[in-house]
Amino acid sequence: MSASLNAAMRHTILAATTNPAVRSIVARYGDRLGAQRYAAGTTFDECLDVLEQLTARGFHAYVAPLGEALDDKGEIEAIVNEYRTILTRLRAAQLDTTIAVKLTQVGLDISEDYSFQNTLRIVDRAAQDQRFVRISMEESPTVDATLRTYRRLREAGYDNVGVVLQSYLYRSEDDLAELLEYRPNIRIVKGAYLEPDAVAYPAKREVDVAYLRLLKRSLSYGQFTAIATHDERIIDYALEYASRHNIYPDRYEFQMLLGVRQQLQEELIDQGHRVRLAVPYGPDWYPYFMRRLAERPANLLFVGRSLLER
């Protein structure tokens, strides 16, 4: 598939993420389209079974209930309580699983301070178990609020929290430079939202080059780097760079998505590398599923085959 066709398909898929008609169709045929590949069920009971299976196979994981852009305080309170339940059950299960929180899921669309207070409740509860919380990065208009929330938590004394930078945003290198004083725990991703050319690199090659720049600086000056990619060239580069600069394996790990490039995940485990998988769950899987398709539009061929085989 050519780069231009790939980019056009990605744009179309991401645009469909907010289309009610497409959402209705995909929701109706979710199982047939393969949505279950990327999520660990609709309840935490189902998710916990997956987490235990992954642990037995040598994987680490991070978990999050699916959903975003909530503006109803009752729903937001339910999500905060869900996180607290997750933390209690992870402690009982004695699993080395971290959690990820989206600010729009805990009230950012109402106000930044409201989402901060809710995030603080989750982070403080996690700190009691010495469990790590990653604040997810969402669309570009939320970046400033996300980074301010991270800084406020660190300045309040919470060391069990990290953040995400997206290499397709022009600003991310400057953001990383400003975060280095915190010795941050950073996850580097390419980015999975539909962004205008004014704020994001339009070409995949530019995104990849920016990713490598972020990777080198974070590995060299950060506390810990989560290398979130399925790109073998980037993985090989990261390992070579870490070896050449005497950066030990306890300073980084590879992070991947449940259901994506499973053979590569197994190979990295077999080679002795630490791999942490994203293990989301919940009924609100549609936006997440569409972004997974957009990250690799060739997956549409899998979707097509799934429909034809039924």
Image (spheres, grey):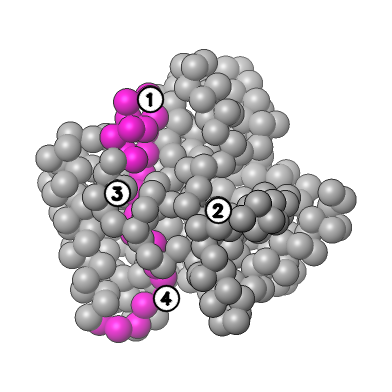
Q: Residues within 10 Å of mark 3 (few under 14, many from 20)?
A: some
Of callouts 3 and 4, the N-terminal one: 3
For residue 46, the mark is 3
In this view, the residue in front, 190 or 113, is 190
Instruction: Give the Cα separation between the discs numbered 1 and 3.
Output: 17 Å
Residue 207 — which label?
none
Residue 66 lies, in percent from the top left, at: 39, 62
In the rendered view, tell whether residue 87 sits above or below residue 56. below
| Whole-percent x, y for residue 143 in the image | 49, 66
Pick whichever of labels 1 and 2 is earlier in the sequence.
2
Cα–Cα gap, marks 2 and 3: 17 Å
Residue appearing at x 16%, y 56% in the figure: 85
Mark 2 or mark 4: which comes first in sequence? 2
- Label 1 SS: loop
Give percent across and percent down for residue 230.
Answer: 61, 38
The label on residue 69 is 4
* Pointer 1 with pointer 2, Cβ within 8 A: no
Q: For residue 107: magenta? A: no
Mark 3 residue type: Glu
Q: Which residue is mark 1?
A: 57
Label located before the other in sequence (1 or 3): 3
Q: CA distance from mark 1 to mark 2?
A: 23 Å
**Quarter of the figure with residue 57:** top left
Report the amino acid beneath label 1: Arg
Bounds of the magenta segment: 50-73
